[in-house]
Image: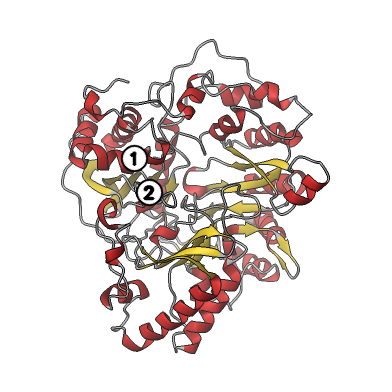
Amino acid sequence: MTTDNKNFVVEGKLADNERLKTESNFLRGTIAENLTDDLTGAFVGDNFQLIRFHGMYQQDDRDIRAERAKQKLEPLQNVMLRARLPGGIISTDQWLAIDKFAEEKSIYGSIRLTTRQTFQFHGVLKPNVKPMHQMLNSIGMDSIATAGDVNRNVLCTSNPVESELHQEAYEWAKKISEHLLPKTRAYAEVWLDEEKAESTEEPILGPTYLPRKFKTTVTIPPQNDVDVHANDLNFVAIAENGKLIGFNVLVGGGLAMTHGDTSTYPRKADDFGFIGLEHTLAVAEAVITTQRDWGNRVNRKNAKTKYTLERVGTDNFKAEVEKRSGAKFAPSKPYEFTSRGDRIGWVEGIDGKHHLTLFIENGRILDYPGKTLKTGCAEIAKIHPGDMRMTANQNLIIAGVPAELKGKIEAIAREHGLISDDVSPQRKDSMACVSLPTCPLAMAEAERYLPDAVTQIEGFLAKHGLPEESIIYRVTGCPNGCGRAMLAEVGLVGKGPGKYNFHLGGNREGTRIPRMYKENIGEQEIMAELDSLIGRWAKERNESEAFGDFLIRAEVIKPVVNSAKDFHDDSFVPA
């Protein structure tokens, strides 16, 4: 390690992942050899972890695991791939190519839009894994560094209205993504059959990469659609007269935790201050390298940037970033977040182009009876001259539609169930991670549970005279945070089959973490509590007061002020 201050390095026996990375020959491992082993559908040994650096997770269908065991078969091993797509922008030709692959080569046939503003293929069997990467390469895409201990897909606010400002911010998201990518040629050698490089250096990430995963965003206020406080590093765009002049830099956010381990907790990002555009890449690199050198490589549960800041002190971390980048943070420029949802339906940009945001429940694009979402998206892609944008809220924007095509594209969308006038505000403000049956970490349902749960909440809102109101409601099947439940007004975190930790008190802007209200309770009890609390909200709230703010004011729950000190403090939950 190259830090001047060894007091900030955690001493002790390194986590086994550090051995794995050291011995991986810069992420090559024996993946290529494993591909030719037809005795198993799995990637074995260290390769099980190493394929994550190549954008994949090994999974199996847990719904049929027991039945396959009875038949003396191994689980139906397959991979989930997450593409690298900074800012979520994809061309229509690229869309049609991924649509074709999902249809022909994946078990489930779906395209899954994720909270990381990209898409995932689920259920790709081993013989199709290499062709999948080669298909992506043929259309100018890859899945490098979308998982593993690296900087992952860089998010950018999906703002189709302020098109010029969005374009500038999007270009920075791409630059940051490219600058922080691993330099190893392992991906190209294994998947694209390029000649093996004689040597590899990782000047930014280092030979053992980062201590843990790292997430980065570029955000355009007043939209907080990327949830800045869920990420390690955030560049909040500051504009003057419609032109980008620099960024406020927020560091150290993250939502993952471990059940029963009070040393883990969700945490908001700290505001380091303002930088001019010319310092953007240097600051991004300095934050990454400081976390690389000071992050905890002994205990992976405390390895993320948020814990490094708590351990070494925000001021010390910030000073090191200034030293390494050669940039001095100025006081942050004023900005405000007013919302974080997507503007569903049509909007017109300042450039005169039209943009259609399609609500995709759970981000799952598949053909259902009477609702052929996947076919509809493909039909739109065939005639659309602009691009398509995936949002961090799992929705899809048909961007840059000329006026003469607006009617035709809307007709296609309605024909295939991509537009419905019956989608409630509550359904638009609800989100879940994938969870069962494919995620190996899932403890409870999320994606499959969400639609019926939302229907119940819609019923409570109507019952209490608030049919046009909504609550930021999110469900995640385990405590790893993929559904961003720890920035919701109501957040459910899976604890076991049909059981969740029930969190309340976040806000609509995504700047307050909710607190656990009740632990390990069932779906019926959760819904009974929500019915009662929504009833109180309807009767007792101030004008336009949001649900989470009401719960804090009414002392149903006390706010999380400092996660490291009070997130796990039961005295902050009223009896």
Is 56 in front, or is 329?
56
Q: For residue 364, which quarter of the picture?
A: bottom right
Tag 2 and tag 1, C-beta contact below 8 Å: yes
Mark 2 lies on a secondary structure that is loop
Task: Give percent across and percent down for residue 96.
Answer: 68, 48
Left or right, residue 182 beside residue 296: right
Quarter of the image for the N terminus: give it: top left
Please state which amino acid type lies under the numbered disc 2.
Gly
Residue ID at (38%, 31%): 298
In whole angstroms, how far apart are the C-alphas of marks 2 and 1?
8 Å
Of labels 2 and 1, earlier in sequence is 2
| Residue 175 at least partly seen | yes
Is 445 situated left or right of 231 in this image?
right
* Residue for badge 1: 305
Q: Nearer the viewer, residue 540 or 45?
A: 45
Residue 355 seen in render: no
| Mark 1, secondary structure of its residue | helix
Quickly name the residue at label 2: 254
- Residue 416: x and y in percent read 70, 67
- Residue extending farthest to the top is 198
Residue at 44% of width from left, 43% of height from top? Answer: 154
Say what amino acid the circle numbered 1 marks: Thr
**Mark 2 Cα-neighbour bin, 10 Å: few <14, some 14–19, many ≥20:** many
| Residue at screen point 42% across, 36% down | 300
Percent x, y of residue 169: 38, 47
In the picture shown, does residue 465 fall above or below 30? below
**Screen quadrant of the C terminus:** bottom left
